[in-house]
Amino acid sequence: MKIEEIEDEIREEFALFDDWEDRYNYIIDMGKDLPLIDPALKTDDRLIKGCQSRVWLRAEHQDGKIMYTADSDAIITKGIISMLIRVLSGQKPEEIVQSQVTFIDDIGLKEHLSPTRSNGLVSMIQHMKHYASQYASLKS
């Protein structure tokens, strides 16, 4: 699936909820479904700076696509990174770099986060794009 198609799915899923309490619960449930990563991967070099909570992100280049794994020590943050992984993992590096990740604004997530969580969200996206950019430049 293309990034935009996955984003559309998420928009449709969030449209089913009438209030933000239900949406937060949905985000938390998505975080619970995030596969656990090996504790050995929770190293300082994989820690995303700028997040209120601790978030570890790993990227691997497999068959021309980027595969992300992540974990967080906060349940809402774990849900947010799981959504980003759902959208960006398994995509080509160039497509990740060029993506606008518009579903975040479309579902109203950023405006319902505290400023520090919102900054953390931006940091997560930047790190994912940075990894993709590194892999894209290796291909060139």
Image: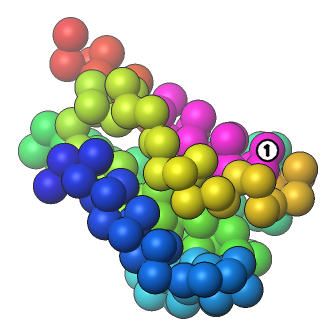
- Camera-side residue of 42 and 10: 10
Residue 75 screen position, x and y as percent: 70, 81
Query: What span is colored magenta in the figure?
Result: 118-130
Judged left or right of residue 50, residue 15 is: left
- Residue 62: within the magenta? no
Judged left or right of residue 116, residue 101 is: left
Of the 4 image quadrants, the one containing the C terminus is top left
For image coordinates 14% across by 38% down, the residue present is 64
- Camera-side residue of 96 and 131: 96
Of the 4 image quadrants, the one containing the N terminus is bottom left
- The answer to whether residue 18 is above or below residue 109 is below
For image coordinates 53% across by 51% down, the residue present is 106
State the scheme by which the image is colored.
rainbow
Residue 121 screen position, x and y as percent: 68, 50
- Residue 125: within the magenta? yes
Residue 59 screen position, x and y as percent: 40, 48
Amino acid of disc 1: Asn
- Identify residue for label 1: 119
Dot 1: what SS? helix
For image coordinates 46% across by 82% down, the residue present is 16
For image coordinates 49% across by 73% down, the residue present is 14
Dominant secondary structure (helix, strand or loop) of the stretch shown in magenta: helix
- The answer to whether residue 4 is above or below residue 30 is above
